[in-house]
Image (cartoon, helix red, strand yellow):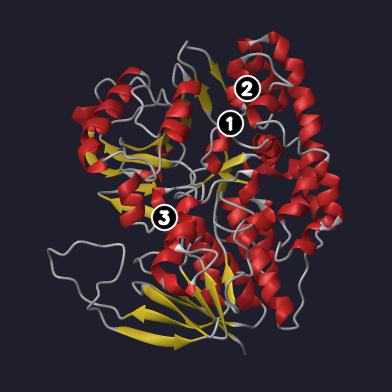
Amino acid sequence: MKKIGIVGAGPGGLAAGILLASKGFSVKIFEAESRVGGRNGSITADGYTFDIGPTFFMMPFVLEEIFAAAGRDLHDYVEMKMLNPYYQLLYADGSSLEPSFYPEKVRESIARLNKDDVEGYQKYLEANEKKMKYALPVLQRPYSSWSDLMNEDIVRMAKYLNPQRSLWEELGTYFTDDRVKVGFTFQSKYLGMSPFNCPSLFSILPYTEYKWGVYHIMGGLNQLSLAMARVIEELGGEIELNREVTEIIIEEGRAVGLKVAEKEEKDSGEEESGAASSGRKTARYGFDEIVMNADFSWGMQKLIPNEKRKKYSDENLAKKRYSCSTFMLYLGVDREYNHLMHNNVFLAEDYRKNFLEIESDRKLSRDPSFYLQNASITDPEMAPEGHNALYVLVPVANLQGEIDWQQEAEGFRSLVIDKLKSRAGLKDLEKHIQYENMMTPLDWQNSLRVGYGATFNLGHNLKQMLIFRPRNKFEEFENLWLVGGGTNPGSGLPTIYESGRITANLLARKHGLDYNFNRKEKIQETFANADRYEAFR
């Protein structure tokens, strides 16, 4: 039985762990935190529960298929509820857009903005259904060598790429009203990119919402990670929490094992750090294969000595393009704000300027767009009775810029609180806050181990996709494999799960076990049976 060591119990590592354990591999996962999930974990305090990162569950068929491959049914482990509408987009002029599973509702919502764009919505759906049918097989394949680009799926998809267009320009072929275009480019936040720079391919992102729905998992999306961990243990795999990997051991160009910090009791006043202290005892574990689920940039720089890396040296990593970061507030309040929907997106008056401030200028905006989740309106267990758990996300520049968060954090918090009061109608917010947790890009880097604080990992420009992205079968060292947002297919929960499936299939192929990269029949079934998700309303 081949031994697989996995660094990190994030969603990619958990997906790979399920599939590898189900194929008979001996799987051992080391997780630095006291909980599984990574960015898909939770914060719990004073009766409030907050998801740390993802709050939209989309394309549920991906995780359903991973569970099914292990002889399990996802819906035996979690309760999934379709949101309707999925969210409301609120513009500075007082208008709004409410995307939904039901096309007639979407058409009505678009018509309130611009009747001339209703017809464009149908054209958008038809074009992106074709594009998605060709894109899905491409996103479920590995790209370990240039020959992997020579396949019929890539050829078929190529005519839909329009690489000369940005996502914003692509949406302009369907819609004339900028507000409607923003409503169909908002999803580029999953990639941490501006729609003015994001490749046109990603017009498929809102299509996935309209085709398969947007869901809340009761208890929070963190329950997905807990369910995955449970399956791994049922299959005989091991997950060790509070065990930080301090080094991936490379010998003669091969990954042969892991150095792992021993569990250690902390002094009462000692703070958590993003890395093991230099004096901490470590143990060495040998493995036949290593799967790295750490954030790619952070993992390369912290777990493999720079002198052993060439293509991904510290110098070369610094030259890569990374996604934006996020400023977060997790607020427990002792009252209910029932005028809010579950998901609320407030757009800056000058959203083009706001995008440029984040991606190009790398400075703090005085009028930022922001996302406000009020999950307890759907899921009362997220907060004590009569209370709300509010999750606030503001896209901001990553740490490649020059923003000094130690100096700016409190001032920016005050600005965000003011926006919540003026734009979201939370006029009495401050006197009701019972619990607060603030996270800046610096915290993403130092506490959550995210390189450059880039919450959505490496950027998704064309020069950092497919063969140009770090490969699932890592190209610098033998026996080292990647999962997560920094490898193929990219960031966002469904694609991170796919990265785990791709890597598990590659390992199965290497060791002579069953694998399948040709999923055309399953994809056809996925499209044909999308209406079944209406049962989760």
The answer to whether mark 2 and mark 1 are in CB contact below 8 A is yes
Q: Can residue 72 be seen in this view?
A: no
Q: Distance between the residues labelled 2 and 3?
A: 31 Å
Tag shown at residue 451: 3
Query: What is the secondary structure assignment of the residue under circle 3?
Result: helix
Could you tell whether 529 is left or right of 397 in the image?
right
| Distance in Å between CA atoms under marks 1 and 3 | 23 Å
Say which quarter of the image contains residue 431.
top left
**Residue to which mark 2 is pinned:** 181
Residue at 81% over, 51% down? 154
Q: Residue 195 carries which label?
A: 1
Quarter of the N terminus within the rendering: bottom right
Q: Which of marks 2 and 1 is nearer the N terminus?
A: 2
Amino acid tagged 1: Pro
Q: Along the line of sight, which residue is nearer the eye, 151 or 71?
A: 151
377 relative position to 290: left or right: left
